[in-house]
Image (spheres, grey):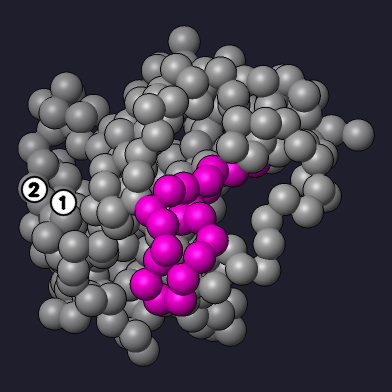
Amino acid sequence: MPNTNCIYNGHLISLYEPAISFTNRAFRYGDSLFESIRYSKGKVMFLADHIKRIKLSMTILRMNVPAEFSTPNIEALILHLLNENSISSDARIRLTVFRNDGGYYTPDTNDISFLIETEALETEGYTLNQKGLWVDVYAEIKKPISKIANLKTGSALLYVMAGLTKKSLKLDDCLLINENGHIIESISANLFVIKNGALYTSPLTDGCIEGVMRKQILALASLNRILTFEQSLTVNTLMNGDEVFLTNAIKGIQWVGQFKNTFYTNRQALFFTEQLNNLLK
C-alpha cells in the first residue's frame, strides 16, 4: 500500500512505528519548524531555498544544524521516500525539524531530529483555481512582530484559530493582521495585490512568513520587469487593487475573487502561474 513510510533521522520507517515519544518537544511546546515542499515532474521544487530557510530558522531558534543537513542529502532522502511510497507524480513533502527531548520550557539540548513525510497530489504542475477565492480579515487575534514572526514554526495556534473562523463563516481563506493593523498574509499563504500593473506585498518587517513561493514571485516579477513594492497593506490597499492573489509552495498561486464588496480579475495570477510551470520544463 502506498504512502505508508516516512523518514526519521535519515532512516526509512513505517508511519505507524512509534518513533516519537510523548515527551517530544514539538508536541509539548511547539518547539519545531517545518517546510512544505512540492515535488512535480521529477523535480523537488525550490529545495535549496527551503533548506536555506529552515537552516536559518534553526540558527535563530538556537538549534544545532547537523553537517549532513544539506540540500543534496535531503533531496536524496526525499527521492528515496517517494520511491518507497510508490509516488511517481506530484506530491506534497513535509520536512519537520524539532529539538530533541529534555527540559521544560528551557531545553536540555539543542540537538535536533527530523522527519520527512510525503503525500500524493491529484494535479500535475501548478494549477490556477477556476473560481476565485472569497476571503475576509481575521481580526480576533493579531500577529506580534518579532524575530520569529517570519518563521514556519509548529506554534501555529493563531493559524488554527483563523482556520476555525474561516470554516464557521464559510470563507475560502482568512487574512491575518499584525499588531499594527496591517494585513500581512493568509492562513497558509503570502499575499500579493496588483494595482495598475504593479505588484505589492507585505514587507518581512510587518511579520509575514518569509515564503519560498513569495521569493519566486518577486524574482519572476523582476525578471519580467514588473514593478514591485514591499510595503504595508491595508483594507483600502486590497479594496483599491485590480487583483489579489495568494502564494504558497504547494499550490503556487490562488487568485482571490472577492474581498468584502470588491471583486477581482486574475490576468496577472494566470501569467505568474504560466511562469511557474515554465520552470518545470
Decide which of 156, 248 is in the foreground and name it. 156
Residue 213 in view of the camera: no
Q: Indicate the amino acid at tag 2.
A: Phe
| Residue bearing mark 2 | 229
Decide which of 163, 18 is in the foreground and name it. 18
Which residue is rendered at x = 52% and y = 33% of the image?
Answer: 38
Could you classify mark 1 by the number of other residues whose Cα lies within 10 Å: few (under 14), some (14-19), or many (20 or more)? many
Q: Position of residue 152 (x, y in %)?
A: 38, 55
Q: CA distance from mark 2 to mark 1?
A: 5 Å
Q: Position of residue 173 (x, y in %)?
A: 47, 67
Contact (CB < 8 A) between labels 2 and 1? yes
Residue 229 falls left or right of residue 279: left
Relative to 61, does residue 129 appear above or below in the rendering?
above
Indicate which disc, 2 or 1, sits on the residue closer to the N terminus.
1
| Residue bearing mark 1 | 200
Instruction: Look at the numbered disc 2 and give the secondary structure of its residue.
Output: strand
What's the magenta region? 96-117
Q: Indicate the amino acid at tag 1.
A: Tyr
Residue 197 falls left or right of residue 86: left
